[in-house]
Amino acid sequence: MANPLNNFIAKYPFLKFLSNRYVIVLVFFIIWMLFLDNTSYLLHRELDQQINELEANKKYYQDEIKKDNKNIKKLQDLDRVEEYAREKYYMKRDSEDIYIIEYEEDELRKKDSIANLQ
C-alpha cells in the first residue's frame, strides 16, 4: 500500500518543493518577522503613521509660534496694544460707547457649532 502523502504529492508536484524543510523554516521565519515579532512590519507601519502625524503637528505648532512671535512684536507699540484691546476685548475709553452688532447668520453659526459639539 502506498503512503497517502506520496499519492497527494504525486497529484500536486509543487507540494514536493513546499515539503522541503528549508522552505518550511523560511516560510515560518518570514511569517514570524512580518506579523509576530516585536519589530514586525505591521508595527513599523503603525509607528510610521504616528511619526507622520507628529511631524504634521510639529509643523503646525511651529507655524503658530511664528504667528504669535509676529503678534508679540506688533504689540510692543502702545498704539497696537490699544487697537488689539479694542478689537479683541471690546475695551473703550471713558468718553466712548461701544455698540456690538451681531447678525442673524452669526447666531445661526454659533447654534450649529454648539449643536455639533453636543
Image: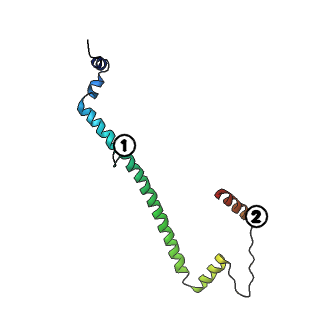
Read off the residue under disc 2.
104
Mark 2–mark 1 Cα distance, whole angstroms, equals: 57 Å
Tell me the SS state at disc 2.
Answer: helix
Task: State which mark lies toward you, 2 or 1.
Answer: 1
Residue that lies at the very extreme toward the front in this rendered image = 1
9 displayed left or right of 60? left
- Nearest to the observer: residue 73 or residue 24: 24
Tell me: residue 8, above or below residue 37.
above
Query: The residue under label 2 is which amino acid type?
Result: Glu
49 displayed left or right of 2? right
Query: The residue under label 1 is which amino acid type?
Result: Phe
Tell me the SS state at disc 1.
Answer: helix
The image quarter containing residue 3 is top left
Colour convention of the picture: rainbow
Q: Position of residue 82 (x, y in %)?
A: 63, 83
Q: Position of residue 31 (x, y in %)?
A: 33, 39
Q: Position of residue 52 (x, y in %)?
A: 43, 56
Q: Quadrant of the C terminus?
A: bottom right
Q: Residue at x 74, y 85 (%)?
A: 96
Read off the residue under disc 1.
35
